[in-house]
Image: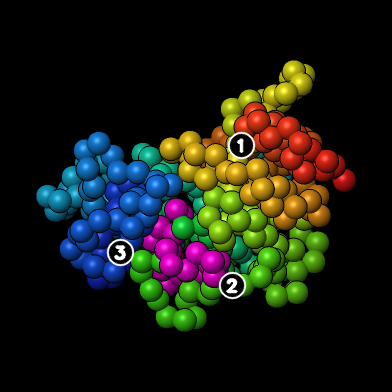
Amino acid sequence: MPVSQLSSSSSLDLIICATCGTQFPTTSPPPHCKICDDPRQFIPPTGQSWTTLRALRHPDQTHAQTHETHPYRNEFHPLLPTDIPDADLNTASLIAIHTVPKLAIGQRAFLCRTPRHGNILWDCIPFLDDATVATIAALGGLRAIVISHPHYYATHLEWARAFACPVYLAREDEEWVVRRGESQEQVFWDGGRLDLLGGQGHGQDKLEVIKTGGHFPGSTVLWWQAWRTLLIADTIGTVPSGIYHVDRLPGTASFTFLWSYPNMIPLPPDEVLKIWKAIEHTDFDSTYGAFVGMHTHGDSKKRVLESAKIFVRAMGYLDHAIHKEVCL
């Protein structure tokens, strides 16, 4: 896939919300951030602040309004296969990408490498520089980008243009796109499932996006069948007691289900059931969540259902339909 460098791009000066990482189609700060004004998000006590890709890449050239002081960089960490302790980027099938120091929400993106049909980027992060473009290009570039929900829309048009690939976004969440691109750059998809390889994928190449709703109406997860792995973003939230899950007491949760994560507003029980029904046909043993260290291994599908029942029961819904569900 062809790639381009960003150094001379005028879009380096487009405004980015420093809290959520969303890029706006303007070089002057807007009156507010639509994403942060939504009750799922928040505005920091210090108020709304803004930055740009240029400021993030070159803090010594920062404009006064951006207040950047740290040089940012993206780190790449191989995750799959897990049975190769010294796996490097060239041999890894799943690679996590995150920015240091933490930027905006702090989520990760995931590079999914298929043997025959190219690479898919799951989710997006705000920071993009020439070094990141070069690293991904050396690993085969990108066939497509797919984003789980609007909080991670970030600078996705910059990524799409750097790698000359489309970005897939759920039609239900189209209203949250604040920077519009060409029709071939932003593909708004309908339906409950999306085959990213258009039916060409088999075995390790098969990647399926599953629309679950919940956190947002179009929230999704990515199922990699060959690896028995579900990439869950925060469509399903990983909790600390789920990461180490050996000989834990009954009633220990591994996951949570929230409408707002920073404000800790739960999803209604019917939405939790809807998420489960969307993924009950899948077979997965591991999950990878939005943030560093949010991995679960072993009986992860069973633990999603157990956690859903714990969550719904704790809200007082003892007779809800989810308690009749079984993990096949």
Mark 2 Cα within 10 Å, few/some/many (few <14, many 20+)? some
Name which residue type carries label 2. Answer: Trp
The stretch in magenta equals 151-176
- Give the residue at mark 1: 256
**Residue 201 shows up from this direction:** yes
Q: Give left or right: position of 278 versus 66.
A: right
Q: Rounded to the nearest whole Å, what is the CA distance between mark 2 and mark 1?
A: 27 Å
Q: Quadrant of the C terminus?
A: top right
- Residue drawn at x 69%, y 52% is 274
Q: Is residue 164 above or below residue 128?
A: below
- Report the predominant secondary structure element of the magenta stretch: helix
- Give the residue at mark 2: 189
Name which residue type carries label 3. Answer: Phe
Residue 77 vs residue 37, the one in the foreground? 37
Nearest to viewer (mark 3 / mark 1): 1
At mark 3, the secondary structure is loop
- Give the residue at mark 3: 24
Going from N to C along the chain, the mark reached first, 2 or 3, is 3
Name which residue type carries label 1. Answer: Thr
Q: Rounded to the nearest whole Å, what is the CA distance between mark 3 and mark 1?
A: 31 Å
Where does the image place residue 42, in percent across and percent down from the top left? 35, 43
Q: Rounded to the nearest whole Å, what is the CA distance between mark 2 and mark 3?
A: 22 Å
Magenta stretch contains residue 215:
no
Going from N to C along the chain, the mark reached first, 3 or 1, is 3
Where does the image place residue 157, in percent across and percent down from the top left? 41, 68
